[in-house]
Image (cartoon, rainbow, N blue to C red):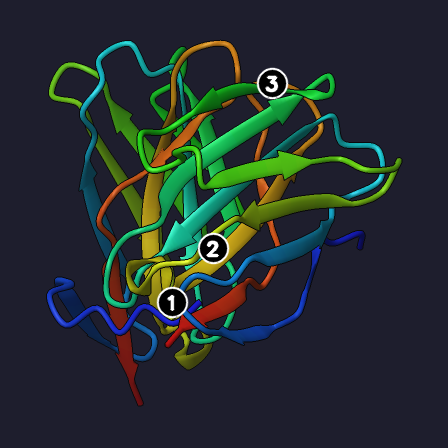
């Protein structure tokens, strides 16, 4: 069964550094998403991406965040200058069409020290 | 995807019993609902979905019930197994861009 893959599984970075989290969505899917989950909390929406542009973003997704689909298979989340409070699990997801299930990867655990 | 969930409500059941996990959703305009299962160290895994024009949908060992009047969703798991132990999230979608909003989650603990 096709799946969403994320790399790395764990990223440790120092405060102020830039990080790029990578995702390969399911190949025939058209919608892409990033979510995050702070330890012990629920999964929070960050951004959705469709037709090569951001379709919606949350208030968490400020100017420090950006997304990109650099080629036909990858979908990346960049955090320009990490803060301690950015430490969380980051999940990439994709869906085939609107109003269809999102399929999630197993996440990247980001630790900012 | 660890959800240590210090403040998560927990449902404890005996293996073989039926489990019912409840969820209240917030947006009366939501028209599509999904239940996800999250095991330790993994991302949310799709279980079952239901659209707002339905009030019940069945899958393998799982049933989702939707009550739009009181904005309530439930997940029933028949003959619960130890492998069902996980955190369960309901999620709702409203609007055209498939933005999925998760609820707070319930931890299901299955005891042999």
Q: According to the image, label 2 marks what residue? A: B61
Residue B87 percent coordinates (x, y):
33, 63
Circle 1: element type: loop
Q: What element carries label 3?
A: loop
Q: Quadrant of residue A7?
A: bottom right
**Rounded to the nearest whole Å, what is the CA distance between mark 3 and mark 2?**
27 Å
Query: Which of the two marks, 3 or 2, is nearer to us in this view?
Result: 3
The percent coordinates of residue A105 (x first, y second) are 62, 56
Q: Residue furthest bottom?
A: B112
Identify residue for label 3. Answer: A98
Question: Quick check: A82 above or below A58?
Answer: below
Circle 3 crowding by C-alpha within 10 Å: few under 14, some 14–19, many from 20: some
Going by the image, does A105 lie left or right of A42?
right
Residue B23 placement: quadrant: top left
Disc 2 residue crowd, few under 14, some 14–19, many 20+, Cα 10 Å:
few
**Can I make out residue A111 in this image?**
yes
Residue in the image at 56% along x and 37% along y: A66
Q: Name the residue under label 1.
A: B79
Work out how far the residue at label 2 is from the one at label 1, CA to CA, in angstroms. 7 Å
Mark seen at residue A112: none
* Subunit bearing disc 1: B
Image location (x, y in percent) of residue B102: 33, 40
């Amino acid at each position: 069964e096709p799946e969403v893959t994320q790399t790395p599984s764990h990223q440790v970075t120092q405060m102020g550094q830039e990080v790029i989290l990578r995702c390969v969505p399911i190949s025939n899917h058209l919608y892409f998403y990033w979510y995050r989950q702070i330890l012990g909390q629920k999964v929070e929406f960050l951004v959705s991406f469709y037709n090569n542009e951001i379709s919606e973003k949350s208030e968490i997704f400020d100017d420090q965040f950006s997304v990109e689909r650099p080629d036909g298979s990858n979908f990346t989340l960049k955090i320009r200058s990490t803060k301690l409070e950015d430490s969380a699990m980051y999940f990439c997801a994709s869906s085939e069409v609107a109003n269809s299930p999102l399929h999630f990867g197993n996440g990247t655990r980001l630790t900012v020290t | 995807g660890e959800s240590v969930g210090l403040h998560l409500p927990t449902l404890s059941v005996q293996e073989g019993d039926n489990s019912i996990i409840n969820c209240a959703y917030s947006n009366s305009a939501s028209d599509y609902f999904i239940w996800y299962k999250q095991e330790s160290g993994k991302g949310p895994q799709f279980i079952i979905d239901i659209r707002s024009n339905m009030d019940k949908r069945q899958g393998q060992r799982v049933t989702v019930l939707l009550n739009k009047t009181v904005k309530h969703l439930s997940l029933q798991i028949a003959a619960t197994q130890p492998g069902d132990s996980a955190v369960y999230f309901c999620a709702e979608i409203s609007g055209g861009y498939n933005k999925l909003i998760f609820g707070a989650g319930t931890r299901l603990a299955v005891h042999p």
